[in-house]
Structures are given as C-alpha cells and as structure tokens.
C-alpha cells in the first residue's frame, strides 16, 4: 500500500500535546489488519486534501441499524474517487455508562469489537456525550452494533429525537454532589428509548444532570431538560475548619476571596473568626463552598432544580434553561416517578407544539412561558424570573382568581389570614 | 440486508456506571467530605469514612487510535487497578485508593507522551467538534486548531498559573456544537451559500431548508425552469444551517471562512449567573496547519487575564469588573461595529446609563 503524502498534517506531529495525526498514522503504518491500514491511509489523504484546499468533503445520508432510525452519523465522501477506502466513514454514537465510568476490561472489549468492524478511531466523548466510534462502512455498522449490543451497549440519539444524556462524576467522588446523578440520568434516558431510537420529535431533546450548581455538565446551557442538584435548608459550616482556613490563608484573603465575593452579601466574618451565613439571602451559587470545601458543605435537605430550554445557537440564538421547578426531592421511588412523569409531559407537549427544527426553549419563547407552565400544570414561582414584567401591556382581569390560587398554595403569606 | 443481520436490538439504553466504578467510590457513594489538590492534575478526595480516592488526570488527543486507548488501559492496569473515567473535555482520569502510587502513575503517563494537568486554575483541555475529519459543514479543522493551540498552552495545562480555571472550546462553524467557553475559537462563514441550481430539486426538501433559515432569507424560486431556492444575501447571516439538508447550498469557502474569538462564557452558577460568550475578535485567517494568528490572540487574552484578574475571577467575572473598554485596551484588540449586537434582544446589551469607563 502506498501512503498518501501528508506534508501539512505532518506538521501537527511536533509539539508536546498528544497528536491525533501520529495516532492515525500508527494505525496506517503498523496495524495488522490491512482494511484498517487502507482506511486510515485514505482518511489521512482526504484530511490532507482538506488542509490544502481549506474545505470539508463529507456529506450526510441515511444509515441505520435494523430496528432503529437513528444513532449513526452517516458520512459519505464527496471526493471518494480519490480516497475510496474511506469513502463511507460513518460514526456510531454509543451511550456511555452514566458518569463516564469504565474499567480497562470493558474498554478493551469495546476496542476489540471496533477493531473487527471499524477504522480503529474512537472519541471519549463527543460533545453530546456519546462514545464516538468514528469510521465504519455501511455494512459493518450493523455487525459492530450487534456485537456491542450483546454485551450491554446501545446506540444513542442522532437527529430529531431524545439524545444521549450526560451526568457528572457526582456522588461517586464529589463532596458537592446533592443528588444521585447516575440514577437520574438512567431513569430519564432509559424511559425514552423509543423516542431516542426512532426519531420523531420536532428536533433534538437533551437531558443533562449535574450534582450541584457548579454544573460541570453545562446542563443549564446545553440541555433542554437540565437537572441540577441543590439544597434548601442551611449550608453546613464547620467553624473549626473555617479557623484553619483563616490561619492558613490569612484573614485578608478570606475577606477578599470569600466574604466579599458572595454575590448576595450573605456572608460575614465575626471578630471571633466565625463565618456567619444569612441563609435566607444565600442563592446557592457554590463560590464559597468551592474556595473552602473542607469548611463548607451543602445543607442536608437536598434535592434537584429543573431548568428547561437551554440550547446553543441554531436557530434563534443562545438560550439558557429557564428555572421551572426550583426544588424537588428525589429520595424514593415515587419521587423518581414524578420526575419521569414530568419529563414525559414535557416531551409530549414539545412533540405536539414545537415547529419543525425548533428546540423546546425556542418554542417556549414563541408561545410564552405562562402557556407552557399552564399546559404542564406547573405552579408559578417567583424563582422563575429575574424580575417581574416591565412591559405594561397586560390583561389583568383574572387577577383575583390568580391571587387566590397563590394564597391557596401559600396560606401563611395571606395578609387577610392574620385579620381573621 | 442478510437475514442474519435482521437482529432485533436489545434496547438497553444507558449502561449502569456503578459496575465500572472503583470499589472505594462505590462504598463511599454520596458520602464524600472534602477534596484537596496535592499538585496539578492530581485530586485527593476524602470520605466521611476516612477512605481516600486519588485521581490523576491527563489530556488526550481526543481522536484516539486503538493503540493509544490500549496504552492508556495498560497504564490503568499497572497503576490504578483498571478503573478509569473520561471527563467531558476528553481528559482521562485514573482512580487509585493509594496515594503512594500517584507519582509513578504521573511518570508513566508523561513518559508515554500524555500531559498530566487540567485541574483547578489551569487552562483545561480544549473541547471541540469534528472539523474536517468528520463534520459536514466544517469551515476548519477543529482537531488541528486544538493540537496547535494546546502545544502552545501545554504549560498552562500543567500548571496553576491562571486566576481561576479557563475552559476553551473550538467549533468548526457558527452553529457552535463545541459549546461555549471562557475563550471560544469558532469559525465564521462570511459569505452566503453558493447555490448549484441544477441539483437543488434532486437533493433538497425545499420547505425544510426554508424552515431552517434563522432570518427567513431563503425562498423557493424557479431557476432556468427548474425548482430551486434563492437567498436574500442582504439578510443572510452566513450560518450554514441550510447546508446539511441541502448540500447544493455550498457554504464552505476556503477564502472567506474566518476564525473568530469569543470570551466570557461561563455555565457555572458560581458567583454571578451563567453567562454566554461575547465576540471579541473576528476575521482571523483560517490558516492550516497551525493557525498561528488565532493562537496569538488567545495567548494575548490569557496574558491580560492572568496579569489583571484577581484570584477566583473567571474571565467573565474579570471583564465584568474592569469593563469592556478596558478589556479592549488591555488586549489591544480593535472594537468595531460588529461587536454591537443587532439580533433580537439587542437592547439588553446596550448601555442605558452614564456608567462610563475612560
């Protein structure tokens, strides 16, 4: 086999950061399977051609495994006559275990299967969270899927469907975790496998789970349905550890970097070196916990917040998720059932009301948040807004009924109750 | 398809990660007390039980070949009882219950060409999209841009030189699958698609192409007696969203696709509310194989941030404090009319006050 010259890509082999070019060349030059050597040779040829001409040459198409409608990113080369061995170079999106945990044994098993049927290139993980097995031809996608599916791996989503989810390292390792990310991740996704494997929604729908408001999974920005751990009682403070930080870091450092960085001025440091927290003012931003993880911990009454409608640019521009349910306990079977039921109602409403290629956040912007929450019977909550409306064009002729509803849910807030 | 292949899938969905989790993590699930950062790339988590788990993090090339994956497995077996995980920035993490083996593991990783780091206030590995390797509307190669940039930033990955963590992302088009970051390097198509009218009727479902356009710039049209599409070029924002459902609307352009740099994206709720990234530089040449112009701008921004931000300030926190006029002054980047939003909701980004910075 004659290797394509790759003078431009060769320049990406120098430098200290691990080089993807060196890795692909190793497959081309030393892999025992001729199919893999030839495939990666032509892949490098096409990539070099892209570098020279500064254009991409992949087109989509339709490839799926028997029984499913999605889960594979089809790629056909538009310069396939020049590089025939990588002319079909599809990616199988495979769902990773919740939390992205692996043993070397299971990774080797996946590697062996991929060696049999694919190009030998893989990414842990793509931006949606899938293991990306990059580079199978149409025929081999089925064989590869059959094999890994037998030992517990399943395709993720591609196209207008429920997508593969992501969850953080969470309770397995992190002291900030307020919930069981893995359980939430698997319950949500595995309840919607039909919607994942047979794309029939208006557009993509993503779940992501972060264990605390640091949101290491970027759920708030990239998930249609973001589940983020939080707490609603008082933050836990270990005053002995506070004193230790003060002695290690100095009083000035703690004032400048903890006390005065609190976004709601909920912290103060007493003359006796106690950290006092005005918990009613705390917005659970996590900053002070991040700086002093040994001294400060989330409260004990833990649960999750739900935000709906985060997405990136296409089509109307970026949106963060909107706070929909500020607090929800997730402790027993019935709590989890409630969460899944809410996700079902959300997806049903999305399926029925969104326009083609419209994310749920865009749909909510189009129809208005109030229409959305009324359709899902979600109670209004002041945590849903940054501030009340400024625009005075509003009909308020049902004010009394709405006020009554509020007091039914919040009897202690009703001033007339005091009079009676 | 042969009958043997008509196999009904087992719809098992997301596998249970607990089965692959280190036993110490399983036993202390939900009962972790605190963590420390003994050195860059190494974490030590301590449980209420007193158990410890040590994590060593290393950057990878993201597009892994099986030789590299097997090498990582070998190192994992030798030093970390075979328990590993990946972060969403494609770093690999090895978990150990015994801190004594950490130094040897770090040494094994470094001597095999991996870079240990990416924790706390370092520049983390760049998360990115597929680019020319696999995407269908890439105006640049994400892997190559990232490799070039990380070669220049490798010491910042290895060390804790920044005021707070820095997340960098790269996307090969404006649709921005790469996500947002403290610094994001994204390609901008700058010219409307070129339409091959002979192909549109054969290849494209025209209503769905029309529906994709965010600015309603695409209309059905008859061209030379055949059904096709036309683009109102004054409206077009060159996003490229019409290309996947309609490849005859070619958006890729070797000359007019340029890189742009955005800063201040932060999805964490720590301190302020989450923020989106903002445009700071555009028109940067798409210059393979090393894209030196883009890297130079990123380094300039990092230098200004490192010099002027306070501990714990992310880039968005820093800019919020010093203000945008000072940001452009400190980085020496030109401020242009393109920095002023003209999309819906633009008014929220305009200064309706006499708060000024000179």
Image (tube, helix red, strand yellow):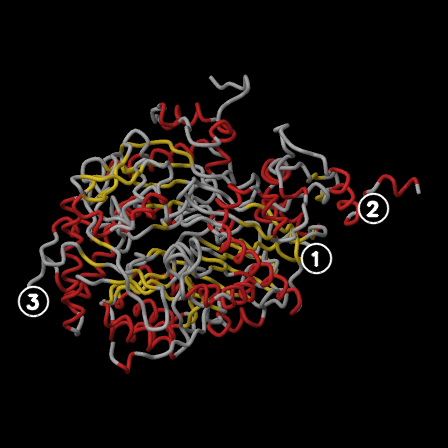
Which quadrant: the N terminus of chain B? bottom left
Q: Secondary structure at mark 2?
A: helix
Residue A117 x, y percent position in the rendering? 25, 73
Which of the chains bears the disc numbered 3? A
B229 vs B25: above or below = above
Q: Which residue is mark 1?
A: A301
Which residue sits at x=81%, y=43%? Answer: A413
Tell me, yes or no, whether the two marked residues, 2 and 3, touch with CB atoms within 8 Å.
no
- Tell me which numbered mark, 2 or 1, is placed earlier along the sequence: 1
Chain on which label 2 sits: A
Which residue carries the number 2 mark? Answer: A412
Disc marking residue B299 = none
Q: Which residue is mark 3?
A: A1
Residues indicated by labels 1 and 3 sit on the same polypeptide chain: yes
Q: Earlier in the sequence, mark 2 or mark 3?
A: 3
Q: Nearer the viewer, residue B302 or A351?
A: A351
Q: Please say whether residue A276 is visible from this viewpoint.
A: no
The tally of labels here is: 3
Query: B2 above or below B185?
Result: below
Q: Is A304 or B91 nearer to us in this picture?
A: A304
Q: Are marks 2 and 1 in contact (CB under 8 Å)?
A: no
């Amino acid at each position: 086999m004659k290797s394509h010259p790759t003078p431009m890509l060769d320049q990406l082999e120098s430098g200290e950061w691990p080089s993807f070019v060196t890795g692909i060349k190793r497959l081309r030059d030393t892999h025992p399977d001729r199919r893999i050597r030839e495939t990666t040779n032509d892949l490098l040829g096409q990539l070099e051609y892209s570098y020279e001409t500064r254009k991409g040459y992949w087109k989509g198409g339709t490839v799926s495994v028997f029984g499913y409608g999605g889960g594979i990113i089809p790629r056909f080369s538009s310069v396939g006559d020049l590089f025939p061995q990588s002319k079909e170079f599809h990616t199988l999106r495979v769902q990773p275990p919740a939390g992205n945990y692996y043993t070397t044994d299971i990774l080797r098993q996946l590697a062996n299967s991929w060696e049999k049927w694919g190009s030998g290139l893989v990414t842990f993980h793509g931006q949606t969270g899938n293991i990306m097995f990059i580079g199978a031809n149409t025929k081999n996608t089925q064989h590869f899927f059959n094999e890994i599916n037998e030992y517990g791996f399943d395709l993720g989503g591609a196209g207008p469907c429920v997508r593969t989810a992501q969850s953080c390292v969470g309770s397995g390792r992190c002291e900030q975790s307020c919930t069981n990310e893995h359980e939430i991740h698997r319950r949500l996704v595995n309840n919607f496998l039909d919607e994942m494997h047979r794309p029939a929604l208006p557009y993509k729908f993503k779940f992501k789970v972060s264990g605390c408001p640091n949101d290491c999974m970027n759920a708030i920005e990239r998930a249609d349905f973001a589940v983020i751990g939080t707490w609603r009682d008082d933050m836990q403070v270990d005053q002995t550890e506070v004193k230790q930080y003060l002695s290690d870091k100095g009083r000035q450092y703690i004032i400048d970097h903890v006390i005065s960085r609190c976004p709601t001025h909920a912290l103060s440091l007493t003359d006796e070196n106690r950290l006092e927290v005005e918990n009613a003012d705390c917005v659970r931003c996590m900053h002070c916990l991040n700086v002093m993880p040994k001294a400060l911990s989330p409260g004990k009454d833990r649960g999750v917040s739900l935000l709906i409608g985060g997405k990136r640019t296409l089509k109307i521009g970026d949106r963060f998720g909107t706070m929909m349910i500020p607090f929800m306990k997730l402790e027993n079977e019935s709590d989890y059932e409630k969460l899944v039921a809410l996700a079902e109602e959300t997806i049903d409403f999305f399926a029925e009301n969104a326009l083609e290629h419209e994310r749920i956040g865009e749909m909510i912007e189009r129809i208005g948040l109030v229409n959305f929450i009324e359709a899902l019977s979600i109670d209004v909550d002041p945590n849903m807004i940054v501030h009340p409306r400024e625009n005075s064009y509003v009909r308020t002729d049902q004010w009394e009924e709405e006020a009554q509803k509020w007091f039914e849910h919040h009897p202690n807030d009703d001033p007339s109750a005091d009079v009676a | 398809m042969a009958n043997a292949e008509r196999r009904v899938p087992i719809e098992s969905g997301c596998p249970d990660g607990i089965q692959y989790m280190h036993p110490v993590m399983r036993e202390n699930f939900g009962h972790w007390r605190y963590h420390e950062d003994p050195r860059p790339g190494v974490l030590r988590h301590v449980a209420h039980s007193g158990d410890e788990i040590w994590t060593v993090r290393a950057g990878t090339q993201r597009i892994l070949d099986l030789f590299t994956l097997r090498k990582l497995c070998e190192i994992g077996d030798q030093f970390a009882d075979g328990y590993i995980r990946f972060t969403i920035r494609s770093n690999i993490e090895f978990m150990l219950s015994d801190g004594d083996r950490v130094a040897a593991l770090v040494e094994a990783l470094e001597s095999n060409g991996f870079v240990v780091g990416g924790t706390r206030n370092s520049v983390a590995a760049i998360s990115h999209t597929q680019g020319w390797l696999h995407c269908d509307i890439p105006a640049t190669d994400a892997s190559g841009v990232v490799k070039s940039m990380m070669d220049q930033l490798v010491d910042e990955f290895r060390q804790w030189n920044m005021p707070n963590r820095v997340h960098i992302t790269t996307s090969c088009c404006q649709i921005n699958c790469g996500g947002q970051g403290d610094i994001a390097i994204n390609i901008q198509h700058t010219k409307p698609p070129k339409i091959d009218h002979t192909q549109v009727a054969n290849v494209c479902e025209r209503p769905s192409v029309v529906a994709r356009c965010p600015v309603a710039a695409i209309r059905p049209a008859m061209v030379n007696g055949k059904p096709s599409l036309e683009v109102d070029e004054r409206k077009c924002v060159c996003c490229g969203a019409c290309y996947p459902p309609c490849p005859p609307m070619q958006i890729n352009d070797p000359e007019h696709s340029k890189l742009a740099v955005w800063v201040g994206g932060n999805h964490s709720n720590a301190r302020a509310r989450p923020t989106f990234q903002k445009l700071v530089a555009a028109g940067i040449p798409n210059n393979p194989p090393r894209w030196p112009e883009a890297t130079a701008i990123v380094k300039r921004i990092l230098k200004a941030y490192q010099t002027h931000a306070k501990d714990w300030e992310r880039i968005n926190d820093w800019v919020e404090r010093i203000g945008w006029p000072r940001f452009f002054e400190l980085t020496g980047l030109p401020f242009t009319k393109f920095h002023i939003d003209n999309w819906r909701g633009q008014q929220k980004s305009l200064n309706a006050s006499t708060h000024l910075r000179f």
